[in-house]
Structures are given as structure tokens and as C-alpha cells.
Image (cartoon, grey):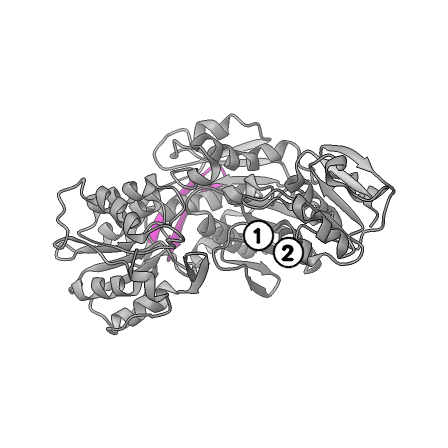
């Protein structure tokens, strides 16, 4: 493609210097530049891509996109340069144009929120499949394209724009008519979904998380809201209205997002009369959920192998989106029943032990509360809930105390441990969580413990467990690594819990994992 052809699709072009040029590829990584490539200089959190323009030129870049004035970059005379207001946004649009805007040939749904995004995405994928819609999906665990199931990484958020557009293009090539993207706040704020034309925007909830990354709660909420604002400017597709799916039960999002215009707003919830989609006659068991789904499209009995009240909300979110897309109610029922669960989301680990052991991804105060409330529903009068969790380093410090408070309130026994401490002293993180636990009448060494090594923490919980108890280990879920310092070490909570149930520990973390 020619540079001017590509530049025509980029929003907020401030300056085009030099001659047109044929472009052989696009990258924002100077190490990946090949002769004829367009290099996009993106300002990162720690590194400014403008510093690497000389390296990109030496590697054979044919043109550069950046935010600085050309004079400040000392480019060769006449060298093609595109100055833009936002290089991150330009990068997304450039990759979309390079792939011929694949989202414009798909009915595209975006799912955002603090908790429940992945489950809601998978539920909607199962429902669309039950309706016979050829559907692709990208969530923070994997990407599904035709018969392929692709791992999207370790601590994965929304993928890089190049990967998003490549996945969407592959979906079109595989015959998909629909696609679902899990849209994280960081992915939205960093414009990784720029160039995607959404038809449906779904929110699960907006609670306390990632405030440090966004600066303020308001900025975090607005990052989520950009998905809904994008409906107004997205390309319109035949027979696909722009739909916003909103959670009436969520005070963090409902009023704010309801004020954003859409062709249609579908409101779901359990605790208010003014909703479109709801569930009644709900029954919870450790084996799943049964309820009656009520909507303007009809009423039906539903059954799901998923567990917990939070998954009722996820089911309602997915059902609302599907019904708004014209999916028959019978397919909603079939899809909900077919979705067996997600690795690391309330996943049972059974090694023949006389108590229940569960791995969950809950890593926010709201998610931890939901997981513990679910466990309290299942545990017998003789049983106890034992929770093992940590809180990440270099992330929202306030949630450490909040999560400790949730455990102090709802768990019988609590084991505090590591969860990606990164470069922070682990002892300091544990102390902040312990402060939250101690706001309740808890005694360290009697009903809560600090065990820095996560493998040892799981083993400690197993030794505490008695018949009829529930062990709930939270925070890592499906993830396959844990970060100490700047290094990702292999770690799988499910395997670690299996080993603990056999009296062993999973020793893949660095030897300093038990130290501050």
C-alpha cells in the first residue's frame, strides 16, 4: 500500500512531509523494521518511540509516523513523515487499514468491565454458536478462529493492534460473520482497538481496579466508556443497530453509561424493576445455576454448570447481547447450558480429597467478595471457607486493604501470599493486606496467616482443611506465570493446588519468593 493511501484513514493528521512511498509493512518496534516498513513512534510508559527513529531508518524504514515536529527529529531532507495527534490511535487505524478493515465485515461485540468479562465473552460465544452463527472470539485467555484455539499470552490484556486486526482478518477468511472482543480498560485507553467498528457494547461492572494505571477512578471509568462512545462513529452495517448493554445493578457504571447515546439500550439486572432482561426463581448449588430468564423476547427456564450469583449477572449480560442481535431464545438456553466454564474461573480441583478445592481468578475486591459469597452458599454448617490470595505489586495499593477486609469479613480462615509482587517488597504488600484483615476480629496465627511463598501457602491451606471445608485460591486463575522483579517465572495455580493436595509444593518460583 502507498503511504498516502494509509494516511487517508488516520484520524487527526497534523502534517504530511516528503513524497509518497510504497509501504511493505507496519511496526512500532524498531527491532522489527525491515526495508520498506512504516515505523510508528509511540510514546510508551517508560520509553519514547521517537528515540528509536534513527534505528528504524538504519534498518530501512521507508516512512515514519510520530507526534513530534519533523524539525526536532532531524530526518533526511524529503523523507516521508506523518505527524499525528496520537500515534497510538494512528497505529490501530493503520493496522486496520492494512488488513482492509476486517471488523466492517463482521457483526462486532465488545465486552468490557472490571470482573466477568471473560466469562461473559465465552457465554456469548457459546450462545451465538448454538444459534448457528459463525463466530470468532478474542479474550484474555485465548483467541478462537474457526477450528483454531490460540493462546494469547501470559498476563494478557487486550492484544496489540497488529494482533487484533490479524485475528479479525483471519476470522473473516475462515467464514465468520460475528466476532466478540474482550475490551480491557488498558487496551481501550492505549487505543489497541482503534479501527474496530463495534456494533454492540456490553458492560459487566466497573469496580475498584487499575486506578493506578489510569491515574484516577474517573479516568478508569472513562476508558471503559470509550467502547460505548465508539458506537456513534463506527461504520454502520446492514441490519446491525448500535446496541449498548448495561448493568442496572452496577452503581459504578449504569448512570454514566446510560447517558451515552445508542440506537438501542438493553438493560439487565436482578435488583430493579426497570430492566429488560432479568432472572427469577434462582437456585444455586455447587453443580450450577437454575433460573427463569425473563425478557421482552420471551421467558424460558435456563440451567448452567457455572456457579455463583456473579455468573447469573454474566449470563444476563450475554443473553441481553444475543437477544438484541436477533438470536432466538431457544439458542440462548442451549448456549448457556453448553458453556462448561473457563480454566481458572471457579475451577474445581479434585484429587480425591474430603473437601472442596477451587481455583479462581478473583483479583479485585468485588471479585473476591463474589467468590467468597458463592463459597459461603455451598459450604455446609460444619464446613469452613479457607481463602488463599495475594495482591499485585506496582498496582492499586488501596485494593490490598480492601481485599483484606473482604477476607476478614467473609472467610473463616485466610492465608495471605504472593501474587506478582514485581519490584515491591513482598512483606510490605502482605502487611497492607493484613491491615485489612485485622479490621475484623481476627488473630494472626489463629485464623489468618502470612505465607509469602505461594506454593507453601497452598500447602498450609490444605493442612488446615477438614472434611466439608472449601479451599478457594484466588488471583492467578488461568495465568501461567508470576512476576518477581522484572522476570516472569512459570506458575500454574491449578498445578500448584494439585501438588499441595498431595503434600507437595510447586517449586518453580525464585528462591527469594519467600522473602521481601
Q: Which residue matches tag 2? A: 167
Mark 1 nearby-residue class (10 Å; few <14, some 14–19, many ≥20): many
Q: Which percent across, then down, holds residue 249?
A: 38, 34
Q: Earlier in the sequence, mark 1 or mark 2?
A: 1
Residue situated in front as seen by the camera: 314 or 494: 494
Q: Is residue 128 placed above or below 68 in the rendered structure? A: below
Q: Which percent across, then down, holds residue 485?
A: 42, 56
Residue ID at (79%, 38%): 8
Q: Is 304 included in the stretch rendered in magenta?
A: yes
Residue reaching furthest top?
A: 259
Residue 301 visible in the current orientation: yes
Residue situated in front as seen by the camera: 456 or 126: 456
- CB contact under 8 Å: marks 1 and 2: yes
Residue ID at (55%, 52%): 128
Labels 1, 2: front one: 1
Residue situated in front as seen by the camera: 42 or 419: 42
Give me the disc on residue 159: 1
Residue 99 visible in the current orientation: no
Is 366 displayed left or right of 128 in the figure?
left
Is 416 displayed left or right of 360 in the figure?
left
Quarter of the view holding residue 208: top left
Q: Provide the residue span drawn in magenta.
A: 289-305
Which SS class for mark 1? Answer: loop
Assign the magenta stretch its main secondary structure: strand
Which SS class for mark 2? Answer: helix
Amino acid at each position: 500500500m502507498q503511504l498516502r493511501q494509509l494516511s487517508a484513514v488516520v484520524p487527526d493528521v497534523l502534517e504530511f512531509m516528503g513524497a509518497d512511498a510504497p509501504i511493505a509493512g507496519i511496526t512500532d518496534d524498531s527491532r522489527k523494521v525491515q526495508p520498506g516498513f512504516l515505523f510508528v513512534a509511540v510514546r510508551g510508559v517508560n520509553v519514547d518511540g521517537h528515540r528509536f527513529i534513527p534505528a528504524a531508518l538504519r534498518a530501512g524504514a521507508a516512512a515514519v509516523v510520530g507526534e513530534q515536529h519533523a524539525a526536532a527529529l532531524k530526518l533526511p531532507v524529503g523523507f516521508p513523515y506523518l505527524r499525528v495527534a496520537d500515534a497510538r490511535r494512528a497505529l490501530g487505524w493503520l493496522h486496520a487499514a492494512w488488513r482492509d478493515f476486517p471488523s466492517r465485515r463482521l457483526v462486532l461485540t465488545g465486552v468490557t468491565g472490571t470482573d466477568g468479562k471473560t466469562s461473559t465473552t465465552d457465554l456469548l460465544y457459546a450462545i451465538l454458536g448454538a444459534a448457528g452463527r459463525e463466530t470468532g472470539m478474542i479474550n484474555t485467555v485465548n483467541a478462537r478462529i474457526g477450528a483454531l484455539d490460540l493462546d494469547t499470552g501470559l498476563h494478557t490484556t487486550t492484544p496489540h493492534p497488529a494482533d487484533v486486526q490479524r485475528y479479525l482478518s483471519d476470522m473473516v477468511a475462515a467464514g465468520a460473520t460475528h466476532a466478540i472482543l474482550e475490551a480491557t480498560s488498558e487496551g481501550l485507553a492505549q487505543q489497541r482497538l482503534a479501527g474496530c467498528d463495534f456494533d454492540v457494547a456490553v458492560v459487566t461492572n466497573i469496580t475498584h481496579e487499575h486506578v493506578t494505571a489510569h491515574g484516577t477512578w474517573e479516568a478508569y471509568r472513562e476508558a471503559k466508556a470509550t467502547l460505548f462512545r465508539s458506537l456513534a462513529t463506527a461504520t454502520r452495517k446492514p441490519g446491525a443497530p448500535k446496541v449498548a448493554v448495561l448493568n442496572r445493578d452496577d452503581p459504578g457504571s449504569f448512570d454514566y453509561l446510560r447517558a451515552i447515546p445508542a440506537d438501542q439500550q438493553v438493560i439487565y439486572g436482578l435488583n430493579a424493576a426497570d430492566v429488560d432482561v432479568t432472572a427469577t426463581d434462582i437456585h444455586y448449588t455447587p453443580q450450577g445455576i437454575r433460573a427463569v430468564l425473563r425478557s421482552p423476547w420471551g421467558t424460558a427456564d435456563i440451567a448452567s454448570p457455572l456457579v455463583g450469583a456473579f455468573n447469573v449477572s454474566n449470563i444476563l449480560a450475554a443473553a441481553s447481547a444475543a437477544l438484541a442481535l436477533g438470536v432466538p431464545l431457544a439458542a440462548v438456553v442451549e448456549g448457556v447450558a453448553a458453556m462448561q466454564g473457563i480454566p481458572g474461573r471457579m475451577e474445581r480441583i479434585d484429587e480425591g480429597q474430603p473437601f472442596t478445592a477451587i481455583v479462581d481468578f478473583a483479583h479485585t475486591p468485588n471479585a473476591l467478595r463474589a467468590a467468597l459469597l458463592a463459597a459461603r452458599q455451598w459450604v455446609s454448617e460444619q464446613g469452613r471457607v479457607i481463602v488463599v490470595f495475594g495482591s499485585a505489586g506496582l498496582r492499586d495499593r488501596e485494593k490490598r486493604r480492601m481485599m483484606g477486609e473482604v477476607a476478614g469479613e467473609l472467610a473463616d480462615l485466610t492465608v495471605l501470599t504472593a501474587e506478582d509482587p514485581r519490584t515491591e517488597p513482598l512483606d510490605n504488600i502482605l502487611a497492607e493486606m493484613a491491615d485489612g484483615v485485622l479490621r475484623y476480629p481476627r488473630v494472626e496465627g489463629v485464623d489468618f496467616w502470612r505465607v509469602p511463598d505461594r506454593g507453601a501457602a497452598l500447602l498450609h491451606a490444605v493442612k488446615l482443611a477438614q472434611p466439608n471445608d472449601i479451599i478457594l485460591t484466588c488471583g492467578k486463575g488461568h495465568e501461567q506465570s508470576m512476576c518477581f522483579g522484572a522476570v516472569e517465572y512459570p506458575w500454574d495455580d491449578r498445578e500448584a493446588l494439585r501438588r499441595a493436595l498431595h503434600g507437595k509444593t510447586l517449586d518453580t518460583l525464585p528462591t527469594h519468593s519467600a522473602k521481601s
